[in-house]
Amino acid sequence: MPYFTYIPKWYQALRKDLVWSVPATADEKTIYLSFDDGPVPGVSPWVLEVLKAHQAKATFFCIGDNAQKHPEILAQIQAEGHSIGNHTFHHLNGAKTNTQTYLKNYRQCAEVVPSKLFRPPYGRLKKEQARAITQAGSKIIMWDCLAADWDAMRSPEQSLQSLRRHIKPGSIVVFHDSIKAWPRLKVVLPKILEEYAKQAYVFKALSPEIL
Ligand SMILES: [Zn+2]
C-alpha cells in the first residue's frame, strides 16, 4: 500500500479532530519523537538507552498485549520520564473493525497502559470511533513525519533524507520499537538525535496538557 512519509497540510485540515503536530513558532525548536508497537525486549530498552544518551524524552504508544507481557519495560519507560500512550490491545485496524469491538480493545489496553494519549494502529479509525475515544477523554495523536522504518524496501538513508526534508518545529515523528523496524531504526534514530541536537532542537514527550 502506498503511504506518505509526511502528512501534507491539506490532508491534516480534513481531520481537525486529530492531532498532527504541536503548534510551534520557528524558533521553538522542539521535536516530539514517538515509538509505536512496543514494548519489545531488546528493541525498546535500546531505544531508552539512546534517548537517555541524548537527554531526549519521547512518547511510546504501546500495544496492550505487549505491555502486559513486558510490564518491566513499560515501568522503565515511565520511570525514565517518557510518556506512554494507548495503541489498542491487539493492534486493530479501526477501518476494518466494528466500533463496539474497537472501543472494547481500546479499554482493554487502557487497563494496562493508563494514558490520555491514543494513537490508532495504521492511522486508521472511523469518525465514530474517534468521537467515542475523544469523549472518553483521550487525545488522538497522529503524526506529520514518518521514518517508515517498518518498510524493508527502504534504506536507512532514504528514511533519513525524508525526515531531514520534513521535520520542523513541533513535528510529531513516528518510529517503531519493533523487530521489523530494527534494521532501519538502529541507524536512523541515533543520527536524527545527533543532527537535530546540533541544531539546538530539544526532544520532548507529548502530554495531554500541551495539546
Ligand atoms: Zn502500530
Image (cartoon, rainbow, N blue to C red):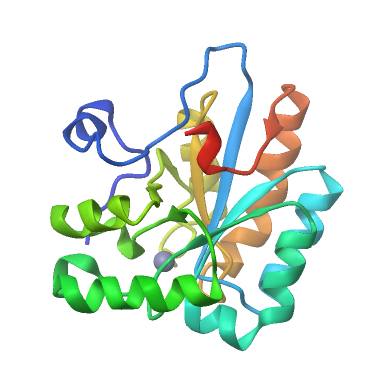
State the residue at coordinates (57%, 43%): 206
**Where's the N terminus, which quadrant?**
bottom left
Q: Nearer the viewer, residue 190 or 95?
A: 95
Residue 20 on image: x %, y %: 37, 37
The quadrant where ligand 1 appears is bottom left
Residue 105 on image: x %, y %: 33, 77
Question: Outermost residue toward the right?
Answer: 53
Q: Quadrant of residue 76?
A: bottom right
Q: Nearer the viewer, residue 30 or 185?
A: 30
Q: Nearer the viewer, residue 10 or 152?
A: 10
- Please state the total of marks drawn on the protein image: 0
- Note whether residue 141 is visible: yes
Q: Quadrant of residue 143?
A: top left
Left or right: 43, with 84 as reference point: right
Residue 57 on image: x %, y %: 71, 45
Residue 147 on image: x %, y %: 49, 50
Q: Is residue 211 above or below residue 50?
A: above
Left or right: 56, with 207 as reference point: right
State the residue at coordinates (72%, 22%): 199
- Note whether residue 63 is visible: no
Q: Nearer the viewer, residue 110 or 162?
A: 110
Q: Is residue 78 above or below residue 91?
A: above
State the residue at coordinates (60%, 33%): 31
